[in-house]
Image (cartoon, rainbow, N blue to C red):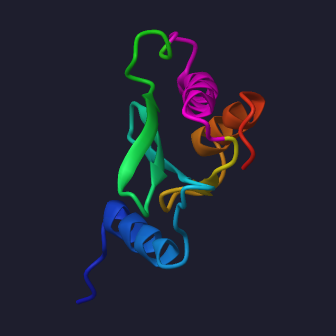
Amino acid sequence: MISKQSRDSQRRKRHARVRLTLSGTAARPRLSVFRSAKYIYAQVIDDHEGRTLAAASSREPKLAAGEGKVASANAVGRAIAERAKAQGVSSVVLDRGGYRYHGRVRSLAEGAREGGLDL
């Protein structure tokens, strides 16, 4: 019998495959996105230094305004852009985390662009 992999294990495989070529530098750090069923999280990571430069999530009361998950993802994108710019980061490379570029992931990326980040 063929065993079926879970969606999360399939996503983790996709993410690991993408991470072989995708890396954040000091000049252009990685904007990493994690999407749970209820919240969305974003981090700006410098992989060479191994440190997080900025982070934001929809669990923060200001960013979870209650108007829906896609709208709160857009707010998280704007917040991560603001926090990254405060750290001197103007352009990043988007790490979708193995998720498709639509819905909440797309809304977060568009919010980051609206906030002034170059993706």
Q: Residue 49 versus residue 9: which sits nearer the camera?
A: 49
| Quarter placement of the N terminus | bottom left
3 to the left or right of 8? left
- Residue 83 position within the rendered picture, expressed as x and y whole percent measured from the top left: 55, 27
| Quarter residue 89 falls in | top right
Vertical arrangement, residue 25 with respect to residue 59, above or below? below
Q: Can residue 119 be seen in this snapshot? A: yes
> Residue at horizontal 47%, vertical 79%?
20
Residue drawn at point x = 60 percent, y = 22 percent: 75
Residue 30 in the image, given as x and y percentages of width and height:
54, 54
Q: Is residue 86 above or below residue 16?
A: above
Front residue of 51/106: it is 51
- Residue 81 appears in which quarter of the rendering? top right
Q: Which of the 4 image quadrants contains residue 79?
A: top right
- For the record, the magenta segment spans 65-89
Magenta-span inclusion, residue 72: yes
